[in-house]
Amino acid sequence: MAAAVWTDRGTRAKNLLWILTGSRSNHTALKPRYDALVIGGGHNGLVAKGGVKTAVLERRHVLGGAAVTEEIFPGFRFSRCSYLLSLLRPHICRDLELKKHGLKVYMREPHSFTPMLEEGMKGAPPRSLTLGSDLAKNLSEIDKFSQKDAKAYPEFVAHLEKLASAIHPLLDSPPVDIKGVTAGSLRKRLAATKTLMPFAKLGLKLGGNIPDFYEIITAPIMKILTRWFDSEPLRATLATDGVIGAMTSPSNPGSGYVLLHHVMGELEKEKGAWGYVEGGMGGVSQAIARAAQSYGVDIFTEKNVEQILVGSDGATKGVVIKDGTEIYSNVVLSNATPYATFKYLTPKGALSEEFIKAVDQIDYTSPVTKINVALDKLPNFLASPTPDDKPGPHHQCSIHLNCENVDILEAAYKDAINGRPSARPMLEMTIPSVLDPTLAPPGCHVVSLFTQFTPYHIKGREWTQQDREDFADTVFDWVEQYAPGFKTSVVGREILSPPDLEKIFGLTGGNIFHGSMSLDQLYLARPLPSLSDYRSPIKGLYLCGSGCHPGGGVMGSPGWNAALTAISDLKRR
């Protein structure tokens, strides 16, 4: 167990119900029949036609899936798993009127802070690299390490933004309907050609940059970064976005796409920005739940779905929950991972052996151990000291530790693929309580440590409690070197290894994306080529979680796209 110490826009929102569940369950009684059921109250869910009776069934006591806020230690409220907001698509936020339903976001400026472990020159503090939205300040920071890199940086940012913005049409639509375009009557094929439009928009927007786009989604991120830059702190800082959440290294093919995936978001119309949700990430889920409930959606916690009901005709009939209650519906949308959906929730014999074999091959490898820390004072970094426990601008952003050199990231990765937690792990520290006072008592802070790389099994065996404590001690020892006094300020800590993330949040393998974001598991192949249109082999059963296109982190789009597919099918019945 985990270680703890101490809609057509304008009218579509009126005609569609979209569930990305979130707060407390409502007080209505569970009905015996619904038009649509959603398994799992995560931040992806269902869009259904207005007037459709819909229910969401969450197995835990709190809704939101990975986007939850929980009080782990008295007075300290944590974004326990997911911890930053960016990839919530703007049209979803707008159509669901999430701000009206309580969503408030704190923008972060600067965006990242990478301190060095080095002796300062002539009494000066160690160097650091701070990057944000102010280009002039960025160039001044980069110039400390390389004048050449400072000159190249504006062009690099513009280049990356062009590639990232071009992919937006693909995020907001289901993948191309290959079967529809290539088979059936002429009328059906012509109707299916509309699914080609997002791809056409991508090509038109890229224009002459198509070769560059192909390179970045297939290449190692270091191939790209080495071409642009010389200085290690800048290359390593940028490379972290190419490996974050992924069991890969900056020198592995495909890490370029992971970087692109993390810079293609936006927040409050600022491209590439990430922010803190007031009250923690559960605030997103609560706002979405209120929007859903305002349309009459029933939301229930502690309703653990044990099995999907499949009739003799091979179609979905509903679900049975753990207490034996059967709930019937026309369609079921599973917000669980594809593996959990087909291996645990679907009756044995309802799917072919060939299909199950393909499901077994989906990659869920995770490098992440999340450590949530309660502090009685603010960390004070040698590279940017602040007096009197006062937060500096660098405290509000992503703080990259052990990230000043790409070789450090490579060594950390090699430890994990050899079955060992990293001896010098890559650390992303965030301190949301610097901007959001609702998370901790006065003078205290909550810290998220998103750490890499740790394997699911340690040398082929299960994690023990001692393994968790030993790894957390290693992490804290490294933080202490950057911010002396950190360890004595710790009030409590929760250590979530990959198996803990799987057990608590239903993340197969502990993978935060519901499946690796590798090239063989994207777009038409996410999570499998036969499942890229969200439809399962069982009629009426759909996937709507992050295991579907466009993948993990793109909050809402999988559920939005899946629900539109389900609506279309219901209309044809």
Image: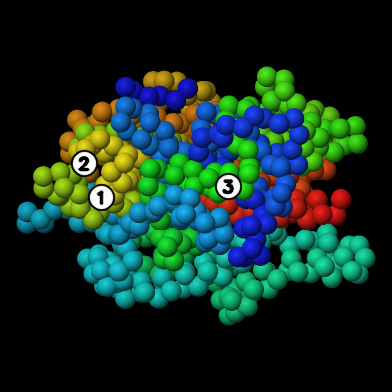
Residue at the image position 72 percent from the left and 52 percent from the top: 49
Q: Depth-wise, is mark 2 or mark 3 nearer the camera? A: 3
- Residue 566 place in picture, x, y as percent: 75, 50
| Residue placed furthest toward the left | 122
Residue at the image position 74 percent from the left and 30 percent from the top: 32
Amino acid type at image mark 3: Ser
For disc 2, the neighbor class at 10 Å (few under 14, some 14 to 19, many from 20) is: many
The disc label shown at residue 294, or none: 3
Query: What secondary structure is marked by label 3?
Result: helix
Residue at the image position 69 percent from the left and 25 percent from the top: 321
Pointer 1 or 2: first along the chain: 2
In this image, 312 relative to 522: left or right? right
The disc label shown at residue 395, or none: 1
Residue 405 visible in image? no
Q: Are marks 1 and 2 in contact (CB under 8 Å)?
A: yes
- From what the image shows, is residue 34 above or below residue 113? above
For disc 3, the neighbor class at 10 Å (few under 14, some 14 to 19, many from 20) is: few
Query: What secondary structure is marked by label 1?
Result: helix
- In the picture of the structure, the residue carrying the numbered disc 2 is 378
Pointer 2 or 3: first along the chain: 3
Amino acid type at image mark 2: Leu
Amino acid type at image mark 1: His
- Residue 264 place in picture, x, y as percent: 50, 62
In this image, 496 relative to 446: left or right? right
Instruction: Give the Cα separation between the discs numbered 1 and 2.
Output: 9 Å
